[in-house]
Image (cartoon, rainbow, N blue to C red):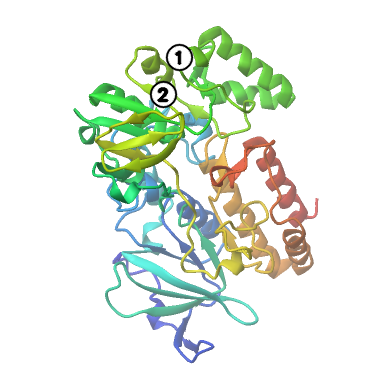
Amino acid sequence: MTTSTDRPDPEATTLALSRDGRPVSDRGDTVCVIGAGASGLAAMKNLKEHGFGVDCYERETGVGGAWNWRHDRSPVYASTHLISSRPFTQFPDFPMPDSWPDYPHHSQLLAYFERYADHFDLRSHIWFGTEVIRVEPVEGDGWDVTTRSTGGYGPERTSRYAAVVVANGHNWSPKLPGYPGLEEFRGEVMHASSYKDPAQLRGKRVLVVGAGNTGCDIAVEAAQQASHCWHSTRRGYWYAPKYVLGRPADQVNDALLALRVPLRMRQWLYHSTLRLTVGDLTRFGLPAPDHRVYETHPIANSQLVYHVGHGAITPVPEVAGFNPYGVQLTDGRQIEPELVVFATGYLPRFDFLDPKVLGDDSGTGRPNLWLNAFAPGHPTLAVVGLLQPDSGLFPLAHWQAVLFARLLQARRTRPDRAAAFAATAQARAGERYSGPVKESTRHWFEVGHVDYLRAVQRALESLEGK
């Protein structure tokens, strides 16, 4: 917990009572931000700039969220770098140093967030080592937020806020597959969230399950450290090089988007580039993609095909099941890995909220939001950073935070426009901002950054009466 003397103490404010009679510390017009990762920091900074008081609760002892490798829930491993290039990842009002590489290392990202927090004086508003265990809407308006020390120590404390920003991230709760016989397997099994260093792979027979960016990275490291590496995928994928025409691939793609090149033309250009550089992936033993480019989240990896071509990675199909000493594949083969790494992604978790508050009436865990941020019927609640963009996330989180701050301002000064905004959120919840994508949990929050930012711009203009 920070020791700044200029930060208000929630326990020292006027007490109210909750619906069940619990004492509640009334924080007036202050906004609660949950999480001090990239999205939470952006929310705090923009709310402050728009004149709002902010209290942020962070369960860990430092800023950075997923990019702080010291945090228990961080999925970062030793070699993690950005997969979106620096200009498309940095916050629009806080550029990364020009001397940094196109794809900075995770340690540089953490330093960037620490400087961001210091530059905008955010630490004095953060309660470190404090987790949010319950967020409840108050009848009429506002939110009761119940917190306690991380790990369950100490008493619970409830504070009432005018608004809440949920920025707890969505890449920390592992999505674990279920396979017949898995519990009988005598080898080592881990989720990619537990992978930190290539030493964990050294000298072992390794099976990596999953073809997302993390799975491909771990397979490449296993190719260099393991005695043998199998890489299991459910379907064929398009493996994008990180550089095209001497430039980061996302910068080339963004230039095409700026020119409003149609999707089909961009797909044709992408396919043509791959034919000229990589060729037919099936000749390496990789399955043919069952979809067109941009219909799954892009896999940015320049080394996977290289190591497959050199025989250091053996592509295999989907896992059918396990037995005590091996793994059965769907093509009938059996392999005998010593270590299985499930790079099978993550699921969003908002344990402190009733799922229905975020529009999840089906119980799937998938929020039903407008602009992936605004919950129907709750105009003073926003989720920031719940996006899987085709470029960098942080600029999008910045503009989400700006939009929410402007909405809160409009509730004070132009309630008619705020009411129209709320009606739009109700009517357009679940709207997509990408082309056709494969239906899977991996693509729940997929957005095309250009289409998404245009939608946010239109929402901002509606609040401003343009």
| Image location (x, y in percent) of residue 314 | 37, 22
Query: Which residue is painted at 27% across and 22% down in the image?
Result: 224
* Amino acid type shown at disc 1: Phe
| Image location (x, y in percent) of residue 134 | 46, 73
| Image location (x, y in percent) of residue 238 | 54, 24
| Image location (x, y in percent) of residue 94 | 48, 40
Which one is in front, 412 or 37?
A: 37
Q: CA distance from mark 2 to mark 1?
A: 8 Å
Helix or strand or loop: what does disc 2 sit on?
strand
Residue 105 in sight in this render: no
* Left or right, 120 with reference to 150: right
Helix or strand or loop: what does disc 1 sit on?
helix
Query: Which residue is painted at 22% across and 36% down in the image?
Result: 200
Quarter of the image with the N terminus in it: bottom left
- Which of the 4 image quadrants contains residue 309? top left
Q: Which residue is mark 2?
A: 315
Which one is in front, 23 or 135?
A: 135
Count of labels in the image:
2
Q: Which residue is mark 1?
A: 284
Asked if the residue at tag 1 contacts the one at tag 2, i.e. Cβ–Cβ closer than 8 Å, the answer is yes
Q: With respect to residue 357, does 293 lie above or below?
A: above
